[in-house]
Amino acid sequence: MSALTDLIPAHRPSLAQSLFAGVVVPSLCAIGVGTLMQFGVGPVLGDYWTSVGVQVGIAVMLAVSLNIVNGFTGQFSIGHAGFFAIGAYIGAGVSYYGALLIWNDASAMAHGAPLVWNNSKSWLFGAGEWLMIGGAILGACVAAAFGYIVGLPSLRLRGDYLAIVTLGFGEIVRVLLQQTRPQVFDGAELREMSAGELVIPPLGGATGFSSIPKYANLWWVWLFVAVVVFFAYRVKVSSTGRALLSIREDEIAARAMGVNITKYKVRAFVLAAALAGIAGALYAHSGNVLQPRDAGFQRSFDCIIFVVLGGLGSISGAALAAVALSIMTEALRGPEPILENWIALLILTAVISIVAAILRAVGNRGWRITLLMAVTPLSILLLGLASKFFTDATGINLADYRMVVYALLLIVVMLVRPNGLFGLTEIWEYFGPERAKKPPTTPPTASQAAAAAPTEGSRP
Amino acid sequence: MSEFLLDVREIGISFGGLKACQQLTLQVPARGLHGLIGPNGAGKTTAFNLITGVYQTQTGSVSLDGVHVHHLAPHQIAKAGMSRTFQNIRLFGDLSVLDNVRLACHLRGTHTLIGTLFRTPMFVAQERAIRERALKMLDVFDLADLADEQARSLPYGNQRRLEICRALATEPKVLLLDEPAAGMNPSEKVALAATIRQIRDRFNLAILLIEHDMGLVMDICEHITVLDHGTPIAAGAPREVQNNPKVQEAYLGEPGAVL
C-alpha cells in the first residue's frame, strides 16, 4: 500500500480551481445571503423584526462558534461571552474613536453607506463601515489571542474544572471592562490624552459604551453569519475537525492515533474566540449600548443553551436553535407580533407542507422532519391565539411568564433528546439518500458505497 | 543502533507501592511476531501503555528503529511509527467508519487552520489523498461497504477489525495488538491468526501481541515473553516457554503440571 504522502501530488488541484471553489464561490454565497436578507427579507419584516433579525444573526454566529469548542472538541467552555465582549469593545473602540479622530464625528449618518443611509454621498460602502470591518478583524485577532491564553490551561483541565476556568475568564473580562475610563465624546479631548492615560482605555466603564455608529444592518450581519458557518463547516469536514471530534470521543485513542490534543484544543479555542469576536464587533454596531455585563455569564449561558439544544457538533442544529430561541424570546413578549404576522406563518406552513408532500412522494425519509418543521409555524400561530384568548378571559398577561415557558421548553427537550435536537447530524443529512442503519439484505458494492458518501467536490 | 526494530530495555513503573511493571525487556526484529502473555493482572496492558507513552516509564528505555521514544508523548510515538489497538475497543463511536480511518491517516499530513478555512490546493490534495487511502484501507479489511455507518453501530467482530484497520492507517512500523481475540469464538480466532500473519506480510511490519488464548499465541508468535506480577519470568520460543516450570507455576499454580 502506497504511503499517504505519495498519493498527495496526484490530487493537487490548480490554484485557479481551488481559489474558485475555496474563496470565490463562498464569498458570492455570503454576499448573496446578505443581499437576500437585506433586500428580500428585511422589507417584509418591518423595523422591529429587522432589528430582531440582526440580533438573531449575532446569536447564530455565537452558537456556531461555541459549537467548535463545546460541540466538536467536547470541552465545556462557559466563558464564551468574554470573547464576544472583547470583540465588541475593540470593534466599537476602533470605529467610534477612529471616526472621532478622523472626522470629529462618530454618527453613522455621516459615514455609512447608501445601503442603509440614503443621505450618504459614498458609493456602496461608507468609510465608517470600513472602520467597522477593520475593528471586527482586530477584535477577532485580539479575541483569538485571548482564546490562546484560555486554551492553554484547558490542556490540563477537563470537565467541571475547565468550566470554572472559562467562567472565571468571562468574569475577569467583565470586571476589567467595568474599570475602564469614562467615554470621551470629543476628538480634541482624546488627542490631548497622554499615552499613560490610555493604558486604561476610555471604554465607558460601568456606565457602558454608547453612541457607537449603527452600521450593522441585516446585510453585514448575515454576510458574516454565512462566513462563520462556512468556516465552521469546513473545519468540521476536514482533518482538523476529525481531530477535534476524536478528542471529544476518546482522548486516549486520539493520542494513540497521533492527534496532538494540546495543539487541537488550543486551535479550537482560538478559532471559536475569533469568530465570537467578529460577532461581538457586529453586535457593537447594531445600535446597542455596550455594557460590561455583555461579558457576563448570562450571555455565555445563552450560547451554551443554543449549542446543547441544537445538538453538540451540529452546526445547522445550533444555528437553528439560536434562530428559534432568539425569535421565541421576542415572540413570547406577547401574542401581538405573532398575530400580526399570521399570513406569513400560514404561508410558511403551506410551503413546508408542500415540500414534505413532495419528499414523501419521492420516497425520501426527509419528509418526516419537514412535516415537523411545517407544524412549527402553525403551532406558534395557535399558541399566539390561545394566549390572546387566555389573556382576554382572565386578565393574566402570559408575557410576564415567558422565561418560565422558555425554561420549561428546555427541560422538555433535554428529557426527550439529551443529545440535543440533532446530535452530530447536520439537518441536510436528513434529506440525503437513505443510509442503511442495519446491514442491508443485498450489500451495496464498494463503488455504490463510495458514490453514496459525500465527495470532496460537492462541498462548498 | 540496535538490530531490533523495537527495543525495550528494563522499563518499569510503580503506582504508589504497586509495582505494576518492572524490568521488562523485549526485542522485536523487523517483521517479527512477538507475544506478550501472562495471567490476569500480570501487567501486560501496563507494559503496552509504557511502550506507547500513555504512561512515562520510570526506568530503562524504549527505542523504535534506533531512536529513543520513551520520553515522547503518545502522539509523537505514533508518528515515529508505533500504533496500537486497545483491549476494550476504543473506536470513535459517533464518527463514521470512514472517518475513523481518515482520522488515523491524519498524522502523515500537515494541517493548518488557514488551509482548512480557505481550502488551499495543498489542503484539498491532502484531504483527497486521505480519503483515497482510507477507502483502500477499508477495502483491505472488507469494511468498504460499511464506510458510512457509525462506528458504534458495527457488530463486535467488525469493530475489532476496524480498530486494526485504523491502527494500520497511521502507517506504523510496529503494531501493538492488545488481546485482539478477546470475545471471539474458535473459528473466528483461526481467521484472526491468518489475518495477523497477512497484515505482517502485506504491510511489512513487526507485531507485538498481548493474548490470553494460548493456542493462538503458540500458533503465530515466533518469540514470547511471559509476565507475572509485573516482572518478566520467561522469554523465548513458544516451545521453550511452554516447558518453562516458572511459567507453568504462574498459570497453574504448581510446578510440573502439563500446560
Image (cartoon, coloured by chain):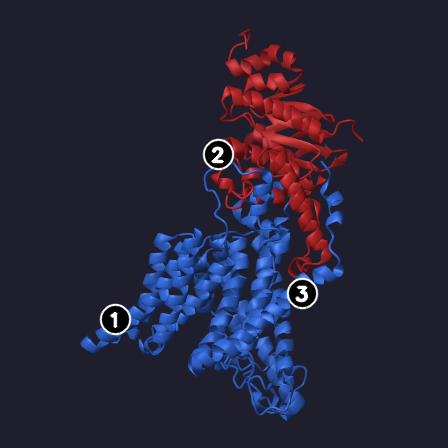
Q: Whole-Å distance between the Cαs marked 2 and 1?
A: 50 Å
Residues beneath discs 2 and 1 located on the same chain: no
In which image quadrant can residue B103 be found? top right
Whether tag 2 and tag 1 are in contact, CB under 8 A, the answer is no
Query: Which of the two marks, 2 or 3, is nearer to us in this view?
Result: 3
Q: Secondary structure at mark 3?
A: helix
User: What amino acid is at disc 2?
Assistant: Pro
Letter of the chain that mark 3 sits on in the rendering: A
In this view of the protein, can residue B39 be seen by the observer?
no
Horizontal side of A329 relative to A232 (left or right) equals left
Question: Type of residue at label 3?
Answer: Val
Distance of mark 1 from mark 3, alpha carbons? 48 Å
- The answer to which of A181 and A370 lies nearer the viewer is A370
Above or below, A316 against A34 in this view is above
- Quarter of the image where one finds residue A220: bottom right
Residue where numbered disc 1 is placed: A386
Q: Which residue is mark 2?
A: B155
> Under tag 1, what secondary structure?
helix
Q: Is residue B59 at all visible to an observer of this figure?
A: yes
Chain letter for the part of the structure drawn in red: B
How far apart in space, not on screen, are marks 2 and 3 (Cα)?
Answer: 42 Å
Residue nearest the observer in this picture, A108 or B229:
A108
Mark 2–mark 3 CB contact (< 8 Å):
no
Q: Colour of chain A?
A: blue
Residue A316 position in % (x across, y down): 49, 60
Disc 3: which residue: A23
Give coordinates of residue A307: x percent, y percent: 47, 60
Q: Which residue is painted at 34% across and 75% down in the image?
A: A342
- Residue drawn at x 59%, y 10% is B245
Chain to which the residue tagged by mark 1 belongs: A
- Crowding at label 3, few (<14), some or many (≥20) Cα neighbours within 10 Å? some
